[in-house]
Image: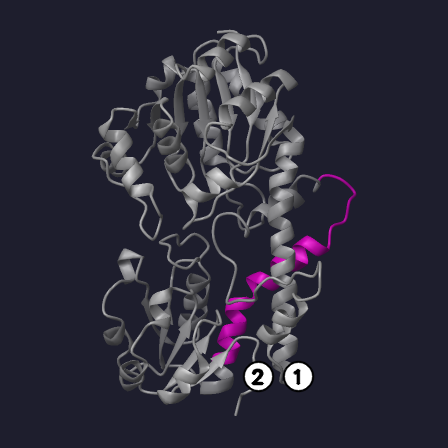
Amino acid sequence: MSLSALEKSILNKSAKIAIVGLGYVGLPVAALLAEKGFQVLGVEIKANRVDLINQGISPIEGKEPGLAEMIKRVVGSGKLRATTDFKEISDRDMVLVNVETPVNDKNYPEYQALRASVSSVGKNIKKGALVVIESTIMPGTMKKIVLPLLQETSGMQVRKDFYLGNCPERVMPGKLLSNLANLSRVVGGDTSETAAVMKKFYAYIVDADIDETDWITAELVKTAENAYRDVNIAFANEVAKICETLGADVWRVRELVRKSPGREMLMPGSGVGGHCIPKDPWLLVSSVRDTDLDLELIPTARKINTSMPAHLMALLKEQAGEISEKKILLLGYAYLEESDDIRNSPAAALAKLLEEAGVQVVIHDPFVPEFTGDIYQAAKDCDAALIITGHSAYAEMDFTKFKECLRSPLVIDGRNLLDRGKMRAAGINLITLGDRSTAE
């Protein structure tokens, strides 16, 4: 199929689409495209996830407005089907790749899933197909890894036998469908003509700006925007520590800073988790590691944000004294409120630190199946509770009952979730991250 023929099939919605990876990004993309009238095939290596999707059931827990209903609808209409077999993409006109791209313990990109998926796509795509990488990748990955691998495994040449682009995703759990529709996108093509066709395709599901560019620019935009967020969260965390030292309230400071035009201060917190922010800055840094460029700001920000679980542990020791052999409750295991996403969970990092210090750790999370259950039972005989994730359920507890369950009425709030007045009325000693203005 020529690029012009592909464009026509996109415009009349006869183009057949494959989505590789049906996780937090791929599944809502697949559902939205099916909802718009495209025939969509989802390819996923997890058979249990495929089974659920083909039953019209969303495997994603947590609060995702509209997603479960949409999946049920498009599967029922026959517009979306899932499979574990890459061979089924052989009749697909477009293939979108959405797989994880983590970093290893040395903060270098780990591309096992990406390489495996691209290789499988290359072995099975038809001539004239357009392959789009939506995963966030290190700048230079399209040219140095994706393109050579596709050409090698397919035996075909880009721009002659197939087309190649990248359109980095911009979503977060809890807002998957909303983010896909309302956030701008950058489409990078092997040529400007490919980027133009990609723009027309994404216009079906994106109601915001769609900007055409090249591969490297698209790669840089995504990694730079998440590095920007990471640096600014690190700034907020440092100000929080300053406020604790000086006897001030970082939340009041933040409120007043933001009143000045053009001044933004992100929220400090118990840690930065998820798949994106903990690793995307490293993808950006890794792109120039083989050069003489010496980067300091981005790695330092990563160090600060990675240290926040340890800082919460220090707050606990400050209030509770020796913590060895004590029983501590962690409230929230997902990295984000109202979500079941546990990737790079700050609670996991804190739990490990506490266990190494001889603490008996109890974990509760209303969205993570392993840690659901009665919150008051979880709190029974605990020496302190630490809020790691800002789930609304924790702000809506019966605090008098909660306090009666604890052995010691100490709560450390790492998300500024709890109301100080309610805690005082319930007889709970509340310590909020970044706030020493009202500490006894």
Residues tagged 2 and 1 counted as in contact (Cβ below 8 A) = yes
Q: Residue at x 24, y 26 (%)?
A: 77
Label 2 sits on what residue type?
Arg
What's drawn in magenta, residue-wise?
Answer: 290-316
Res. 189 image quadrant: top right
Res. 25 image quadrant: top left
In-front residue for pair 28/35: 35
Is residue 134 magenta-colored?
Answer: no
In-front residue for pair 138/116: 138
Q: Is residue 402 above or below residue 361?
A: below
Q: Residue at x 43, y 21 (%)?
A: 121
Where does residue 92 sit, x and y in percent of width and height? 39, 16
Q: If you read the primary sequence from the N terminus, does the residue marked by circle 2 or circle 1 appear first?
A: 1
Q: What is the image's colouring?
A: one colour
Residue at which label 2 appears = 436
Answer yes or no: is residue 288 visible.
Answer: yes
Residue at which label 1 appears = 246
